[in-house]
Image: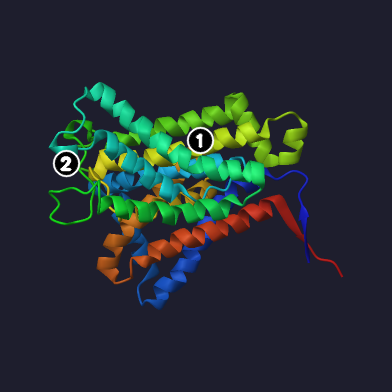
Amino acid sequence: MRLERRTQPSRTALVLAPVGAVAFTLLVSALLVLWAGAPVGRTYGLLLSGGFGSIFALSETLTRAIPLILTGLSAAVAFRARLFNIGAEGQLYAGALAAVAIGGMHDGTGLEWPVAVLLPLMFLAAALAGALLLLGPALMKSRLGVDEVVTTLLLNFIVLLAVGALLDGPMKDPTAMGWPQSVALQSDLELSKLIPQTRVHSGLLGALVLAVGVWLLFKHTVLGFDIRALGANPRAAAFAGVPVTRTVVLTALLSGALAGLAGAVEVAGRTSYVTLDMSPGYGYTGIVIAMLAGLHPLGVVAAAVFVAGVLVGADSMSRAVGVPTYIADVIVAASLLSVLVAALFTQFRLRWSR
């Protein structure tokens, strides 16, 4: 048995691969639901209604999807250039801290600048923090051949330890009664709600604009062509005149900036301050979302809403039928594995030899 590369991958296969991967994931998860002693149909029905069955459920799903769209875009941009950024979690926290450093209530007042200045400066600082955090691994990859998977993954732990030190030290909120959290964001800098009496905020519109912007970048710009060429074949791209180092650096800056913005949007739209449990793994889940979307920026939006709906729906489903909420993590993890296998068979076919 051997793998043989297809001369021209089928467009139908490329479209159906993520759908088939999701279907296979739900089939595998159904076995776990049966093992837990719950009816599969009712469990999946409650999962669906818990994520999309009401205005409240849909608003919670969209709120959860906002940072996932941004981290999914971060992974999609980097992976398109074969820069395997596993550090979006750390970049998200770096962006959140940078946002609070600019817009926080330091000494009870904060920077006394106009909101029109502070708000864009806060998001710019968050994007810059995430971008610079990925710049080092990108340069080490292009100049020294250091594996960026290792460096970006380990940076996550370094950043989280640094966040813990800052939340117990210079950035600790003195009014939090000893709880390790940062100073709060100024109320004028918090994002407005899109639906009254829900948590979904205007960061959703910003995430959608960025998704369209990244799609246009890939489709209509020289940099987008360079990124796609580098991801398709680095040696051929270099031979054709694509500036490899510059493209890797620009890709890293864009990917890190998107992850950093995810942290700023979470702070400004949902939490108002930074805590160590602010992100339940948004950076890692963004990788799953990017793969489910086939690294397509617009597909990232749909994949993020799907994953967010599974995570939100699992809470209400668990209370009704007694299936642990960890089934949502199983669905997300199994989705990644099945998508990788499906993507493999869109590019290769099995050949049997005697």
Residue 230 seen from this side: yes
For label 1, the residue is 253
Residue at 36% x, 33% y: name it. Answer: 125
Q: How is the image coloured?
A: rainbow
Label total for image? 2
> Can you tell which of label 2 and label 1 is closer to the viewer?
1
Nearer to us in this view, 61 or 104: 104
Residue 105's quadrant in the figure? top left
Q: Is residue 270 left or right of residue 341?
A: left
Q: Is residue 342 left or right of residue 153?
A: right
For label 2, the residue is 197
Q: Secondary structure at mark 1?
A: helix
* Circle 1 residues within 10 Å: few <14, some 14–19, many ≥20: many
Residue 15 in the image, given as x and y percentages of width and height? 59, 45
Residue 43 in the image, given as x and y percentages of width and height? 35, 65
Q: CA distance from mark 2 to mark 1?
A: 36 Å
The N terminus, quarter of image: bottom right
Residue at 27% x, 61% y: name it. Answer: 316
Q: Secondary structure at mark 2?
A: loop
Nearer to us in this view, 273 or 190: 273
Q: Is residue 167 above or below residue 268?
A: below
Residue at 50% x, 56% y: name it. Answer: 22
Going by the numbered disc 1, the residue's amino acid type is Leu
Q: Are marks 2 and 1 in contact (CB under 8 Å)?
A: no
Question: Most extreme residue toward the right, as rendered?
Answer: 354
* Circle 2 residues within 10 Å: few <14, some 14–19, many ≥20: few
Residue 41's quadrant in the figure? bottom left
Q: Mark on residue 309?
A: none
Residue at 31% x, 37% y: name it. Answer: 99
Going by the numbered disc 2, the residue's amino acid type is Gln
